[in-house]
Image: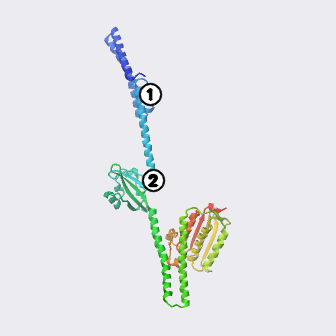
Amino acid sequence: MIPALTRFAFIVCLAFIVAFIVLANSSVELAISAGISILAVPLVYSYINLARLRRYVLSDTIEKMPLPSGFWEEVFFKLQRLVRNLKQKIRTIEQQHDHFIEAFQASPNGIIMLDESDQIEWCNSIAERFFGLIFKRDVMQRINFLIRRPEFIQYLHKRNFEDSLLLERMGPNSNLSLMLQAFPFGQKRHLLLVQDITDLQKADAMRRDFVANVSHEMRTPITVLMGFLETVQSLDLKREQQDQYFEMMMSQAQRMKSLVEDLLVLANLEANTLPATTAVIKVETLMALLKNDAEALSQGKHALNFHVNSPINLLGDEREILSAFGNLVSNAIRYTPDIGAVDVSWRVNEQGQGEFSVTDTGPGIASEHLPRLTERFYRVDRSRSRDTGGTGLGLAIVKHIANRHQAQLVIESMPGRGSTFMLRFPKERLDS
């Protein structure tokens, strides 16, 4: 290929030669016109190519422009290759940027990037939800203008970011506990990482309540036992009085035994998160066992009715199911006054779900207590619970057994109208 400059020099020489020949045979004006005409050809061609280049540059499609011939071919070819390389680098950078943004968006923690003036450069959707931000609206706004908590503003002002900051009552419903910490990076910039520790706070509170409740529940029977033992040791009691004290001591010891047993059952259920087995449980046999235990507990003081309205059996762990059903029946008997009625039934509803329900004519439960009934040691009436021999763990055990069998615990109650406790099992848990 002839170099572009060589071709251009050849055209200029050709123009001078033609002009010299014309000048030798004609006038000067004609020679000049002939030379200019020859030189105008490459100039016009160059103008056309430049106009085409301008059109493709404005449409950002220069790499798709057909290559011209002649002088401009090599120039346009190198220009196209340069543009293609630059665009490929830009696409690679944009893809990397998008991947980083996707990774930050997938993070379970809130992320906020601040510049040297604490203005928001970027934040993910989790941070938007935590603090009520809208990135498109709040970008380049100072963070302390948007999060006006005094402890947060003081945290930013001190610039001591080695420790984290706990912000409570945050979020759209003011129910979140957030742990926040700033990390310096780049040129005086900071990265705010925000973690939702609401569940950890609740778990810690439940742990403290659990320890306090266990201590309280155990302290009472232990105190009674120690008091009776001191009385028997220090006083010369008649045989009848000793028997009475021993009976009361046995009652308190039995209460502690029941409490420890329920705690062990609950601990085993919480440790085992796998679904329960799918062994066939004969409902008629189960109901017969429940009826015998209910009659022994009631001692003829209640009207007990047991109904098996469907021959379909249940699939699950028989020991756990018996424990859950037994807790519901015993609770109904304990909290229903004498001469009251307790109805226990098993049926399959129209949706093909199995339903075990216990309905009593007891005092009922106010609506504000219903969401908390399955909490450990939660009692609507503490004094009455102790009188009836309850440990406060029965419904917590029922809830965990229900979860292991993919069942739903439904509670309906109104003060003065009794209560209904129902375990609803999915179709997969029925032996159809």
Give the vertical position of 160 relative to 75 (above or below): below
Amino acid type of the residue that numbered disc 1 sits on in the rendered structure: Leu
Towards the viewer: 111 or 269: 269
Q: What residue do we see at 45% from left, 69% from top?
A: 208
Q: What residue do we see at 47% from left, 74% from top?
A: 215
Picture coordinates of residue 185, whole percent (x, y): 36, 51
Picture coordinates of residue 179, whole percent (x, y): 40, 60
**Residue 43's image quarter?**
top left
Q: What residue do we see at 48% from left, 81% from top?
A: 223
Residue position marked by numbered label 2 in the rendering:
107
Residue position marked by numbered label 1 in the rendering:
67
Residue pushed farthest right?
311
Picture coordinates of residue 324, whole percent (x, y): 59, 69
Amino acid type of the residue that numbered disc 2 sits on in the rendered structure: Ser
Residue pushed farthest top?
25
Q: Quadrant of the N terminus?
A: top left
Comes first in the chain, label 1 or label 2: 1
- Disc 1 is placed on an element classified as loop
Give the vertical position of 172 relative to 116 (above or below): below
**Residue 317's image quarter?**
bottom right
Closer to us: mark 1 or mark 2? 2
Give the vertical position of 221 relative to 201 (above or below): below
Q: Answer with left or right where residue 301 lies relative to residue 162.
A: right
Asked if one can make out residue 143 in the rendered structure from this viewpoint, the answer is yes
Give the vertical position of 98 relative to 212 (above or below): above
Towards the viewer: 36 or 388: 388
| Distance between mark 1 and mark 2 Cα atoms | 49 Å
Asked if one can make out residue 302 in the rendered structure from this viewpoint, the answer is no
